[in-house]
Image (cartoon, rainbow, N blue to C red):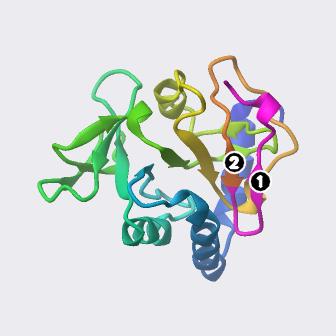
Amino acid sequence: MTDKASLRRELRRRRLAVPRAARQQAARRVARRALRWLQPGLRIGAYQAVGSELSLAVLITLARQRGCSVWLPVVPRRGRRLSFADLADPRGSWRRNRHGIAEYHAPRRCAARALDVVFLPLVGFDAQGGRLGQGGGYYDSSFARRIGRRPKLIGAAFDCQRVPTLTLDAHDVRLDAVLTERCHYRCRAGQLPG
């Protein structure tokens, strides 16, 4: 299981095997662990869970209650750089993107680099901040040019998605931390992009 496609299949199987009650509990625990990043006035990037991904619904509710603005990713028609739509924009509506995934489309948008903290979905992760995504490269392209570790990139996952180490490509962006139902993994600063 050395190639990324095989590893993705195995990790998706693990993620899918998490029982419903454990999923709900994990979503609540991850939201509580995220409180340190949910400060009033911050722009928080989040995601709408797809399939067996960890839900951020509780986290999004907490962020809004604490005075954060919440922004959801929008896949471009061409290219790989995500923009983020303001979930509070009442002119927005839910639509399916080119991959059939529901997205919130709103006139009020911002670039990835304008966010303060981003909670990212993932298929797998390691303790060094390595992230294995779906394989489309959208998050890597969008955050390749972070300035001074802004925004903070926080993975959200089930603990069963952790692997000892990931082999990353030069363009793969590392995470600052990963939150799971069991732990808050602080990724090694020396391994992160500067």
Q: Is residue 182 magenta?
A: yes
Secondary structure beneath dot 1 equals strand
Q: Earlier in the sequence, mark 2 or mark 1?
A: 2
Residue 14: x, y in percent? 73, 59
Q: Is residue 101 visible?
A: no
| Residue contact at pointers 2 and 1, CB within 8 angstroms | yes
Image quadrant occupied by the N terminus: top right
Residue 79: x, y in percent? 36, 21
Q: Is residue 54 visible?
A: yes
Q: Which residue is mark 1?
A: 185
Secondary structure beneath dot 2 equals strand
- Picture residue at 38% right of the left edge, 55% below the top: 41
Give the extent of the magenta segment: 179-194
- Picture residue at 82% right of the left edge, 47% below the top: 163
Q: Is residue 1 magenta?
A: no
Image quadrant occupied by the C terminus: top right
The answer to whether residue 161 is left or right of residue 36 is right
Residue 154: x, y in percent? 61, 48
The answer to whether residue 99 is left or right of residue 176 is left
* Mark 2: amino acid: Ala
- Picture residue at 16% right of the left edge, 43% below the top: 107
Give the vertical position of 150 relative to 44 (above or below): above
Q: Which residue is mark 2?
A: 177
Give the vertical position of 15 relative to 58 (above or below): above
Name the one closer to the observer, 44 or 168: 44
Which residue in the rendered view is the most extreme toward the bottom?
A: 21
